[in-house]
Image: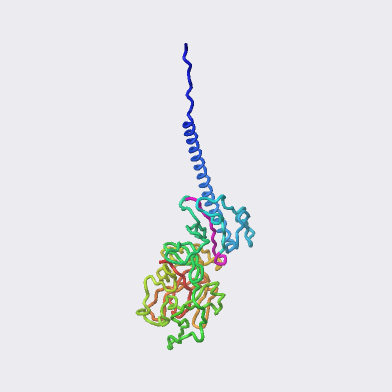
Amino acid sequence: MASKKTTRAFTLIEIIIVLAVIGLIMAFATLSYSNIRSKGRDVRRLKDISQIETALKLYAYNEHQYPASLNFGQNLIGPTSSSTYMELLPQTQTPNDGACTDVQNNFIYTQTENGESYTVSFCLGKATGNFSAGPKCLTPSGIIDFDCSAPELCSAATVCGSSCDYGGQNYNTVQIGAQCWFKENLNIGDRIDNSGAYCVQIDPSHDLWSCQTNDSALEKYCYDNDSGNCDNYGGLYEWAEALDLPYACNNADIAGACTINTPHQGICPDGWHIPTAGEQEMLAQTADDDPGCTFGTCYTAGGKLKSISWDGTDDYGFSALPAGAGYMSNFNSLDGSFNLWSATPTVSRLTAEAMNLNSADDGAYNSGPGRFNAYSIRCVKD
């Protein structure tokens, strides 16, 4: 009699194990697919930001400033040229990924520096390409690893390319070659007039006067004694005031109370300093077509460092503005020259070195004006 073949059935435990394995496989597959989609959204975000950056460069070149606002999901048209710079400004990819919040995930555009610059805030859920995960900030100088919607106090820890707060003002920063510079002229201190009760004669033989004479306070002039000019161009400072030295150092040997440190912080925030004449020349060499130029032969640096609104090309984001200068009871050259103090005194007891750009040409120069002149200040990072 033939034996009956029996088929072994799965036990309940085996079925549970099989189902668990299938569940794990599906979970891993779902997670992998989710990661792939998340990565794809981050890649798309970077591509969209790159397209926005290109469109904004073209816009600024033709319209001579960056747009006051952007409407993502709509076109970008120039108000003066009527040119279309982008048919459809991309909107951020949704949903948000990784550690990005809903707010951080949005593309947020902000015009800064009266149209001379901008920021676009966005976020990457995961490390993508050369960029780490987290909030990012697009500026005319490129993408920086910083949340541009949350400026911090200016310090040695400030990320170059970000903005920071100092003395109640917000300053943008920019990397130019090996140097990190403020993009705006300093505008800190108490405004005083450059005449009257504040002024002291520092050299009777030459009838020279200093008006920033309160050594216990930080003082500034505003062009034409108009506070609005400080808002637009920054303050103007005598040399000793800029270096945070006693006002008598405008007419004194560099020793004792008039000693210059290297680097010399002056009225800049911690971690930043007043540039030396050598650092100013390095800036000009970085910007010039001829990197071996010296002051007086850097014929193209000025045009590349000037702001767009000053008919410059602002290739490096330095955005120099023609703030003019103060000279005892007078002001001159507003809209005609940019004059920047250095921390380098000359041999003369009365003068120090400064960098000059002007409307007449695209060169970058230096001079040795009297320390009682009032010039602009830019800080450079230590």
Range of magenta residues: 112-126
Q: Nearer the viewer, residue 221 or 303?
A: 221
Q: Main secondary structure of the magenta part?
A: strand
Q: In x, y percent, where is residue 115? A: 57, 65
Q: Which of 382 and 11 is in front in this view?
A: 11
Q: In x, y percent, where is residue 204? A: 43, 88
In magenta stretch: residue 119: yes
Residue drawn where x is 53% and y is 64% of the image: 313
Q: In x, y percent, where is residue 106? A: 56, 55
Q: Can residue 232 be seen in this view?
A: yes
257 left or right of 39 in image: left
Instruction: From this view, report whether residue 97 is shown above or below residue 303.
Output: above
Residue drawn where x is 60% and y is 61% of the image: 69
Q: Nearer the viewer, residue 75 or 292?
A: 75
Q: Is residue 294 visible?
A: no
Q: In x, y percent, where is residue 203? A: 43, 86
Q: Which of 131 and 321 is in front in this view?
A: 131
Instruction: From this view, report whether residue 14 is shown above or below residue 299.
Output: above
Q: Residue furthest left?
A: 256
